[in-house]
Each structure stands twice: as C-alpha cells, then as structure tokens.
Image (cartoon, coloured by chain):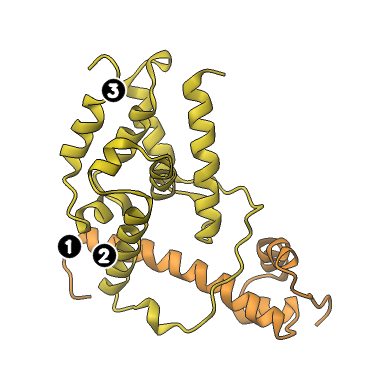
Amino acid sequence: MPSEDPADALAAVAALRRLADQLEDSAVEQAMRAGWSWPQVAEALAVTRQAVHKKHAKRLIAAGVTLRRRG
Amino acid sequence: MSQFDAYLHEVLERAGHEAARDASATIEAHHLLLAVAAGHEPALTSAGLGYEALKDALRREFEHSLGVAGVTTAAFDLPPATPDLSRRPQLGASVKVALDRMVRSHRKKDLRPGHLLIGILQAEVGTVPRALALAGVDRAELVERVRSELPGQ
C-alpha cells in the first residue's frame, strides 16, 4: 500500500468490505439469473447454502429472478 | 412521541433506505448524514453539502479509500444488483456511536435535530470525516455553525 497512514489503511479495509458486499449482491444475482442453483452459488462463495439463501433469496424474489430449487 | 423522537424516527427510516440502496446490511453514520441532508438542513446546505454534493463526496471517499489498496470500482464490470428496498437494515456501529455522543451531551427533553447532526459530525475518524475532508469542508467550523443555529444559542 502506498500510504503509511493507519487511517488510510483502515479506511481501505472498510471500503473493501463495502465493495465486497456490493459485488456479492451483484454476482449472486447474475448467477441466479443465469440458472445457477443455491448449492452451486454457495460452494463458489465457500459459504453454506443456508447462509447464501438467507442473505439473498428475499431480495432476488422481489427482483423477479426465477430461482432454481435444486442443484 | 416528542417532536424530536418523531424527527429521529423519520431520519432513521430514510437512513435505512439509503443503506438498502447502498447494499449495506447496516445503517452507518454516512447513511444517517445523507438522510439529514435530504431534509435540506440549512447548516449543511450553506456549507455546500446538499444531498447530491454529499453523495458525491461519499463516492469520492469510497474510491479514494479503495485506491489505497490499489483497487478501482471501474475494475469490476458487473451490473449493479437490484436493491431490496423492503429490507430494514440494523443500526451499525458508527450510528450507535453518533447517537451515544448525542444523548451523553444533552438531556432528552432538550434534544433538537441539530444535536443529531453534531453527533454525526463529531466523529474524528471514519467515512464521514474523511468524505468531508476530501470535499474541503472544515468540520469544526461546521459543528460550530450547527451549534449556533440551535434554539437558545
């Protein structure tokens, strides 16, 4: 990192977390629109199927995405 | 419900929408500040911090902070996710600290909208002070301006 200021490094961590959250929402939505299943998305993200379902199902249903139930 | 409670409820509601639009699981201080700015707060407006200007300052802070780690938002070509506007994000740590600063400094019956704004602006570190610094805003001066506009000052 070019900066030696701890405030910059800490802010970078916070910003990367925000970016990761935004990317996750976008990438999961793209995958489900492309017909991926929950188990596939969960394995790709290295999280449990329950976790990914709990985090994204309601949003994607509201967004009108057709969700596959089985892998 | 007191007039201030009604104001706080309304601002937190708006801040929740800002957080949901931002794909954030929690309401953070910068969402609260955006919600205050959306209400055309005079001290913010006179400092050049209307809602859109503040949004722009926050975007620049985000890009600047990512840049410290060598990351640009342009590096990712994914379409933005559809936000879930029905979601009710929880209060995040930075909002709790701002609210705590506010209630520790004043008696509940004396609280006015300006006290909430001061509580947000008094953060020494984090997204809000960094965004304001990048926008060239003198935070201490802004706090004084908000204070001077409080009733009885």
Element at label 2? helix
Q: Are marks 2 and 3 on the same chain?
A: no
Q: Residue at x 52, y 44 (%)?
A: B14
Amino acid type shown at disc 1 = Asp
Measured from the top left, where is residue A54 in percent x and y? 70, 61
Q: Colour of chain A?
A: orange
Is A18 left or right of B53, judged from the image as shown? Answer: right
Query: Are labels 1 and 2 assigned to the same chain?
Result: yes
Residue that label 1 marks: A5
Q: Residue furthest right?
A: A70
* CA gap, disc 2 and disc 3: 36 Å
Of marks 3 and 1, the one in the foreground: 3
In the image, B23 versus B69, the foreground residue is: B23
Chain B drawn colour:
yellow
Q: Quadrant of residue B82?
A: bottom right
Q: Residue at x 37, y 57 (%)?
A: B55
Q: Where does the image place residue B134, in percent across and percent down from the top left?
A: 21, 59
Please indicate whether residue A64 sits to the left or right of residue B143 in the image. right
Residue for badge 3: B150
Report how far apart the C-alphas of labels 1 and 2 lie in the structure: 7 Å
Disc 2 to disc 3: CB gap under 8 Å: no
Chain at numbered mark 1: A
Chain bearing mark 3: B
Residue type marked 2: Ala
Can you give x and y, in whole percent of width and height, for residue B94 in the image? 39, 45
Circle 1 crowding by C-alpha within 10 Å: few under 14, some 14–19, many from 20: few
**Do the residues at pointers 3 and 1 share their chain?**
no
Asked whether the viewer can see residue B31, the reply is yes
Amino acid of disc 3: Leu
Question: Which residue does the image show at 38% across and 15% down from the upper left?
Answer: B110
* Residue on which disc 2 sits: A9
Give the number of the mark in front: 2 or 3: 3
